[in-house]
Image (cartoon, helix red, strand yellow):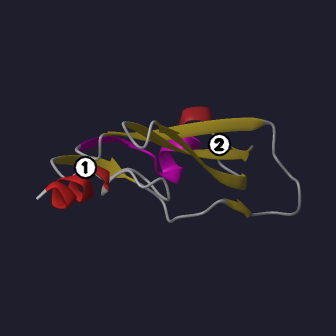
Amino acid sequence: MLLTLGFLLSAGCVGTGYPVGILYNETSMPHQMDRMEATGPARTGDKMGQACATGILGMVAWGDATLDAAKKSAGITEVHSVEFKPTLVFLGVYYQACTVVHGK
């Protein structure tokens, strides 16, 4: 029983991808990626946009961390690079994953 409870509490916050809640989940996300260069090495562009999804205790998750949302946040139409930036606090009590896009 205790082992099952521990698994359920940690299932949505293992720190390897975007948050998923087992009691509530309202996330949109791109494919898993650490960094993808779209138009050449080390090109970052002059704009940066970010979109995030957040989870708490692996029970609830919300947000729109899609590439489209990150592009819209900065008005980017030409993507040069995309990054995945996770933030994990105290074994997943709080977990945020962001898609960061650079371009023009």
Q: Which residues are magenta?
A: 60-72
Question: Is 61 covered by the magenta stretch?
Answer: yes
Which one is nearer the viewer's eye here, 76 or 3? Answer: 3
The residue indicated by pointer 1 is 9
**Badge 2 amino acid:** Ile
Image side of residue 71 versus residue 14, left or right = right
Q: Tell me the crowding category of disc 2: few under 14, some 14 to 19, or many 20 or more residues within 10 angstroms, Cα based.
A: many
Name the residue: 23% across, 48% down.
25
Question: Is 13 covered by the magenta stretch?
Answer: no
Q: Quadrant of residue 29?
A: bottom left
Report the mark closest to the observer, 2 or 1: 1
The quadrant in which the C terminus is found is: top right
Image side of residue 12 versus residue 65, left or right = left
Q: Secondary structure at mark 2?
A: loop
**Badge 1 amino acid:** Leu
Name the residue: 30% across, 57% down.
11
